[in-house]
Image (cartoon, rainbow, N blue to C red):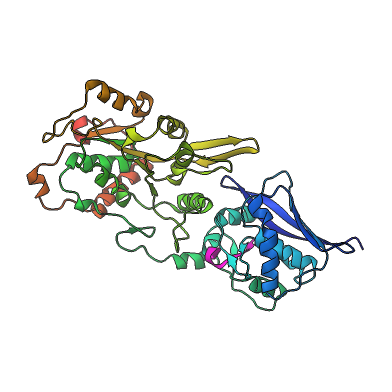
């Protein structure tokens, strides 16, 4: 007897794109019992040997007393992460006759195994489900926590919380109702007041004064413009920028799926929020590295510019960011994508975002503030402003001076709410989408 072979289908992620992987389990008798994984698997994937063995034992399932070889094909594609665990376990059990191999082949399988047999969530399930749907595999066995996410991609998600549930389902002993697109949509519920994808967004009505800044924020929201707010500390630059998500309209379904895929692959989807329905808002620290902001690393992952896709990237204290980060922003601002080249291939991430930045007029912050005197030498002011290159400044459509509000402005009644401004933004977007003729507005109309 030459041995027994069984297969399961799963997917590896190259950037945010799924690549089909066949998990082949081969049991060979007549040799000392052993367990090996081949097929260019990284360390986390190689450690599946221990998780799978412990999970199978914890599920009180028999372990084959044979030489076990797991091949992850194609061998030239690097496999990373723990999402192959469940596929490895089920293909091994199919080769041993514990589950029907033909029924297993009808499913895509993804999930991490705990030592006690529980199936844990993994990043990128929506991308895996989309890849399976494109290749005609309608059903996906996935962790319970990821079922709604997978269903949004058009798959029939079979939620399993434990290895025993997956085995019983494949045997036909315990049917599991699939989560499909309509059911997943019902799980989303309605957005709560003041919340955008589970995160509270402050209201524009809380901002007193700064009418010019408020107007610029509305124009940037409606026209998709990049915005630079410049002024001394305490004038409301950051306060205004953080209220921009509240006046942006919801994403279309196609845009929402695209944004959700990026956040899922990065592992930053908010708990209980399988679909991001509003434009994201990202605000990295000025000490962030170029790889963190732009994306990359040894195993390319989305950076902040891609996590802000279809939304807003806010850079507070713009001149404090490294020159490498500032210069690297030019390419995604121009092209709307980030391309990361590595020896093993190239990963491309979407990065079409609005850039909003805030900066002081000088290092000490006193310049432009009537109540404080600037103590910076002229050479230091020039060096501070030169940290932001002319090439990047040219990409800001709106540059707004933010003076300190007067006492009467601070004592005035609250201004318009975010909801009221969002209504006008949506009307403006409808006019643009309808193809209405454009004219160049006068400066007085803008600001």
Residue lying farthest top? 379
Q: Quadrant of residue 219?
A: top left
Q: Judge whether 7 appears above or below 324 on screen.
A: below
Where residue 370 appears, x then y in whole percent? 11, 34
Residue shown at 67% from the left, 59% from the top:
48
Taking the image as shown, residue 26 lies to the left or right of residue 332, namely right
Taking the image as shown, residue 45 lies to the left or right of residue 306, namely right
Residue shown at 64% from the left, 73% from the top:
165
From this viewpoint, is residue 284 visible?
A: yes
Taking the image as shown, residue 146 lies to the left or right of residue 51, namely left
Magenta-highlighted residues: 137-147
Q: Judge whether 114 appears above or below 322 on screen.
A: below
Q: Nearer the viewer, residue 161 or 62?
A: 62
Where residue 77 appears, x then y in whole percent? 69, 45
Q: Judge whether 261 appears above or below 109 on screen.
A: above
Q: Nearer the viewer, residue 69 or 165?
A: 69
- Membership of 150 in magenta stretch: no
- Membership of 143 in magenta stretch: yes
Where residue 67 appears, x then y in whole percent? 82, 61
């Amino acid at each position: 007897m030459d041995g027994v072979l069984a297969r399961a289908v799963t997917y590896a992620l190259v950037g945010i794109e799924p690549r089909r992987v066949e998990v082949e389990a081969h049991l060979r008798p007549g040799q000392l019992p052993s367990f090996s994984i081949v097929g260019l698997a990284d360390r986390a994937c190689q450690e599946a040997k221990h998780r799978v063995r412990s999970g199978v034992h914890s599920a009180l399932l028999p372990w084959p007393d044979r030489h076990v070889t797991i091949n992850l094909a194609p061998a030239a594609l690097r496999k990373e992460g723990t999402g192959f665990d469940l596929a490895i376990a089920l293909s091994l059990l199919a080769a041993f006759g514990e589950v029907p191999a033909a029924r297993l082949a009808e499913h895509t399988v993804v999930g991490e195994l705990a030592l006690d047999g529980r199936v844990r969530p993994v990043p990128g399930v929506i991308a895996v489900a989309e890849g399976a749907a494109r290749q005609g595999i309608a059903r996906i066995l996935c962790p319970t926590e990821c079922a709604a996410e997978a269903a949004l991609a058009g798959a029939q998600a079979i939620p399993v919380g434990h290895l025993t549930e997956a085995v019983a389902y494949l045997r036909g002993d315990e049917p599991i109702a699939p989560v499909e697109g309509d059911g997943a949509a019902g799980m989303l519920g309605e957005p709560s007041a003041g919340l955008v994808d589970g995160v509270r967004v402050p209201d524009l009505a809380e901002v007193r004064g700064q009418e010019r800044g408020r107007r610029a924020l509305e124009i940037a929201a409606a026209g998709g413009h990049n915005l630079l707010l410049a002024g001394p500390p305490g004038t409301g630059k950051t306060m205004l920028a953080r209220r921009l998500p509240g006046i942006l309209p919801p994403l279309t379904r196609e845009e929402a799926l695209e944004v959700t895929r990026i956040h899922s692959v990065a592992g930053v989807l908010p708990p209980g929020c399988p679909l991001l329905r509003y434009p994201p808002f990202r605000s990295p620290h000025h000490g962030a590295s170029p790889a963190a902001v732009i994306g990359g690393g040894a195993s390319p992952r989305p950076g902040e510019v891609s996590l802000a896709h279809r939304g807003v990237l806010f850079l507070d204290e713009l001149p404090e960011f490294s020159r490498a980060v500032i210069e690297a922003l030019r390419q995604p601002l121009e092209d709307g994508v980030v391309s990361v080249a590595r020896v093993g291939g190239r990963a491309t991430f979407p990065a079409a975002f609005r850039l909003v930045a805030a900066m002081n007029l000088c290092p000490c912050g006193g310049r432009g503030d009537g109540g404080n005197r600037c103590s910076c030498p002229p050479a230091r002011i020039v060096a501070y402003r030169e940290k932001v290159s002319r090439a990047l400044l040219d990409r800001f459509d709106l540059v707004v001076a933010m003076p300190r509000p007067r006492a009467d402005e601070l004592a005035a009644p609250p201004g318009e709410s975010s909801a009221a401004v969002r209504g006008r933004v949506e009307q403006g977007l409808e006019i643009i989408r309808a193809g209405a003729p454009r004219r160049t507005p006068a400066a007085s109309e803008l600001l």
